[in-house]
Image (cartoon, grey):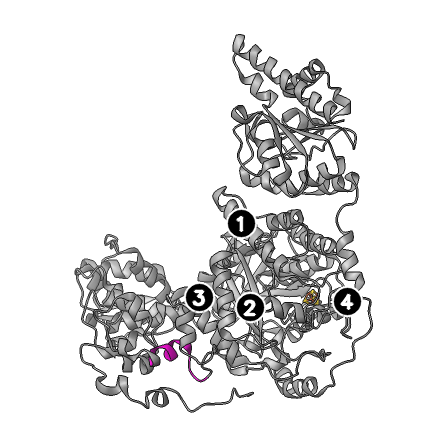
Amino acid sequence: MYRVDLKDGADLAGFRRALRGLVALDVEPDEVNWSGGNAPSLFGDAALLPVDAPPVPLPRPVGALIESVVCHRDPERYALLHRLVRRVVRGERGILDHHADPLVHRLALLDKAVRRDLHKMHAFLRFHEVRDPASSEGPGAERYVAWFEPDHFIVEATAPFFVERFESLVWSILTPVGSLHWDRRSLTVGPAALRPEGLDRDDRFAEGWQRYYESTFNPARVNPTAMRAEMPRKYWANLPEAAAIPAMIRSAPARVQAMIEAEAAAPRRRNPDKAVAAMARQEPATLAELNRIIRGADPLVPGATQAVLGEGPEGAAIAIVGEQPGDQEDVEGRPFVGPAGQLLSRALEEAGIERSAAYLTNAVKHFKFVARGKRRLHQSPTAGEVKHYRWWLMKELSFVRPRLVVTLGATAALALTGRSVSVLRERGPMGFGQTGLGDWDGFVTVHPSYLLRLPAGEAAEQAYRDFVADLRRAREMVEGAG
Amino acid sequence: MDDALLDKLGILADAAKYDASCASSGAKRRTGGPDGIGSTTGAGICHAYTPDGRCVSLLKILLTNYCLFDCAYCINRRSSNVRRARFSVDEVVQLTLGFYKRNCIEGLFLSSGIIRSPDYTMEQLMLVARTLRRDHGFAGYIHLKTIPEASPWLIEQAGLWADRLSINLELASDRSLKEFAPEKDGGAIKAVMGQVGERILEAKEEKRRFSPAGQSTQMIVGADASTDLSVLETSDTLYRRYGLRRVYYSAFSPIPEASSALPAKPPPLQRENRLYQADWLLRYYGFTVEEIAAGGEGGMLDLGIDPKLAWALKNRERFPVDVNSADREMLLRVPGLGARAVDKIVEARRHTTLRLEDVARLSSGLKRARAFLIAADHHPGGLTDRADLRQRLVAPPKQLSLF
Ligand code: SF4
């Protein structure tokens, strides 16, 4: 006969040590007397187990099951686990799939009970705020204390959940089988505690919570059986809101009856036109109002310090739409001020278009980039991102009301047409009427940053001349139309 | 929390309670770390249950119950005489954090009556979410109700901060919507659903964050003349076409200050229950709407038995099935066997030939299943085809008792 002494509660380390010895000596489960704590042995002297037997390799699900089941209150748990492990080391490695096996089934029930208990402790434990004059965080610092009574030895097993969730708070969890203390840096596991008095005495949030609980209940659906299945009475003592339950149930039928019998209320007269008018009014009425919205909104692309708004007079004959602000634009908050912008200015001048008379803007209003060391590398917006910004662009153009919209590069063309456009193949005039939001004449050409990327030489110079020719044609279109 | 805030909390929780769509599941795992607060675990936790058996997981409140609109089924409609209140953005933030720190909730479910304009209202909702996330490092769950009439860019912004966006369809057919919610436009609601669905897909492809837990909606049952068939057809479309994560059904409940447009009667809870079961069959058990509806009569589900049993009783020629050899699809159609039990059966039968007592360890619904199952030591014989099988399987009809 072997005797194994384990600590009270869930002694995972002790069990593991014992298990190694038992497996090393190939001990039959019936040969072991598992005793918790200081219980005197009924079997007199017992044989000793080796203290340094090697680890037992187990399939991961078996390991997880052991960790869970040792938390159960059932005094037979260690013996059952030993039986399971013995079968595993004797070759039944997939034993846990054998759901109908009586031993596997019984252990599954224990496991389920522990998991449920864990889940209920995560769910039903309530912290109360206490102001602690002697706190290490300074007098009166925020501190939280909870009292809970679990069914099984799960207190330590719940610690990761609470630490993760409330890492930035100072708290203690007290239970009759152990306690946890977290000071924002480390966790201390302490002994069993007594129920503290008057925890929720000064906590108005506890009162608020009870009010919420009462108000969120629908008396027309009263069904206490369903409630008790999930929240059995044994938990009520520690739930501040549960005090209200009996009265809520008692008054429910009368409340429902009153609702059903009440004469349907004569509606109070209110003018329905208000709703309709409000909906019509909500659209930004001016470009300035729209710009305020854009400036206040969060970037829909990663990066960006600020939104870069369009620039130029309302009523401009030509609106020029680029892709998105670059590094320099993002810093200055103005469109087309970087190298590509300077090239654009030059080309506009050569084409006979006064830059300050045109309206300049971008399809995407924020700079999208990835940081590489100190540099911020431009990233093309995705089709989805272009679409997110489209509503703004269309509104913007509807205020400017240009006679012609010139799109620079594929992104701008995509924004205006809603489809992907091959710029080099389709450059030239294009109706943007199908957008549904505006009905502008359009003109597709390349983006100046494309010109900057071409290697210097005859081809680059030709490309620049083509770009200027495009702009000149655009100008002629506007003048012809005017 | 002072008395005035307490009072508002009572009013605005009461006003929000008719919305059933408040699960906190589906968010990616996330933690607030040493400077923030909170975590999401993916599964969601019910922190309490009210005596109606419903789970309390999120702080479910309205920003305000003032409303410009006049939807007949809604307690907050313009013409109702209820007490009105309004939270500030900061009050909602403080309530959320206060309850969260006490471990009362998983997060916030915020909806609102429409004040000033749909855009203004949507912006306030978005600001609550943004303040929680950005200023307080809040990592708990946030579900925002989308105002369908708001501008698309605001919905984009809200999606940056919320785990879930939802829009309530409320009524299954556009005609009912016209009748009971004169200012609402079914087309607009579906358009926004389409927009949100599209954005969620895009964001997934681009590995961006946009309402990562998906979108859901709620339909009210029993307020209009829609049949179960048409309700389920609507759900089916929502799941398929709009990629919705969940459709919630809410039995129309008598409300104080009821409108004379709707009859006051107890909510059809059993019908709601059957719809949830049918929805489940639709999503996880491979049933089609037609199959489910065929289990009942005239487009309505059988209230006396669950829809799976109803289908089985009308399709007895497909039973009994052998628990040791039938494929998974067919086992899922056996009354009494849940999806979890079926998976265990499929695993366990690789190790052994299952007898009835083995099945009993794997499933708690054996009483119903045995008339439809063959096991190593069991054959239902003529039981499957007995005319009184329904009576044998159904406990004598009990009124849903109040106590
Ligand atoms: S818009 Fe919403 S809050 Fe307003 S009456 Fe209709 S359902 Fe109620």
According to the image, label 2 marks what residue?
A: B47
Q: Upstream in the sequence, badge 1 or badge 2? A: 2
Q: Which comes sooner in the sequence, label 1 or label 4?
A: 4
Q: Which residue is mark 3?
A: A154
Q: Which residues are magenta?
A: B304-313
Q: Are marks 1 and 3 in contact (CB under 8 Å)?
A: no
CA separation in Å, label 1 and label 4: 35 Å
Is label 2 or label 4 in front? Answer: 4
- Tell me whether marks 1 and 4 sit on the same chain: yes
x, y percent for residue A289: 78, 42
Could you say which quadrant of the image residue A99 lies in?
A: bottom left
Chain of the residue that carries numbered disc 4 in the rendered image? B
Query: Same subunit under labels 2 and 3?
Result: no
| Amino acid on which disc 4 is placed | Ala
Q: Can residue B356 be seen from the camera position used here? A: yes
**Residue A408 appears at what percent x and percent y?**
61, 26
Q: Give me the residue at 17% from left, 60% from top.
A: A91
Disc 1 to disc 3, C-alpha distance? 44 Å
> Toward the viewer: B217 or A277?
A277
Q: Secondary structure at mark 3?
A: loop
- Tally of numbered tags: 4
Using the rendered image of the protein, determine whether residue A1 is visible from the camera's viewpoint: no
Q: Which residue is mark 1?
A: B198
Is ligand 1 closer than 8 angstroms to the Cβ of mark 3? no
Structural distance between the alpha carbons of marks 3 and 4: 43 Å
For residue B85, which numbered disc appears in the image? 4
